[in-house]
Image (spheres, helix red, strand yellow):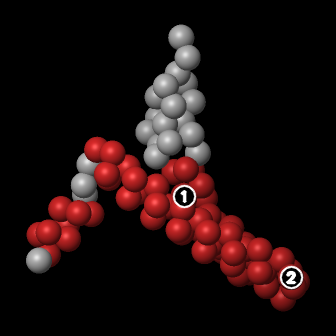
Amino acid sequence: MLRRRLARLFLGGTAGNERLTANTASVLIVLLAVEGATLLSLRSFLPVHVFVGMLLIPPVALKRPARATGSCATTAERPST
């Protein structure tokens, strides 16, 4: 059972990319909703706003398309020649 779960978690290829993209999008939606909610009363929620903003950095960096640098991302593009 555990072996099957781990195999699904580390699934490669297009299925793995699809799973990674879906999970990253889910995390982004939740964090952006919390970030937006903290804007309603920014003075009282400023520490939460800053903390959630810092939590947003890794998923946003993962979703950012790779340019001609050759770095890996979930939506990597081929560099133009």
The residue that label 2 is drawn on is 40
Q: Name which residue type carries label 1.
A: Pro
Which of the 4 image quarters holds residue 29? Answer: bottom right
3D distance between C-alphas at marks 1 and 2: 24 Å
* Front-most of residues 80 and 18: 18
Residue at 20% across / 71% down in the picture?
5
The residue that label 1 is drawn on is 58
Q: Position of residue 59 (x, y in %)?
A: 54, 59
* Front-most of residues 80 and 15: 15
Residue at 60% across / 74% down in the picture?
30
Which of the 4 image quarters holds residue 37? Answer: bottom right
Query: Does 75 sit above or below residue 56?
Result: above
Residue at 27% across / 63% down in the picture?
9
Residue at 57% across / 30% down in the picture?
67
Q: Answer left or right for 44 relative to 52.
A: right
Quarter of the figure with the N terminus? bottom left
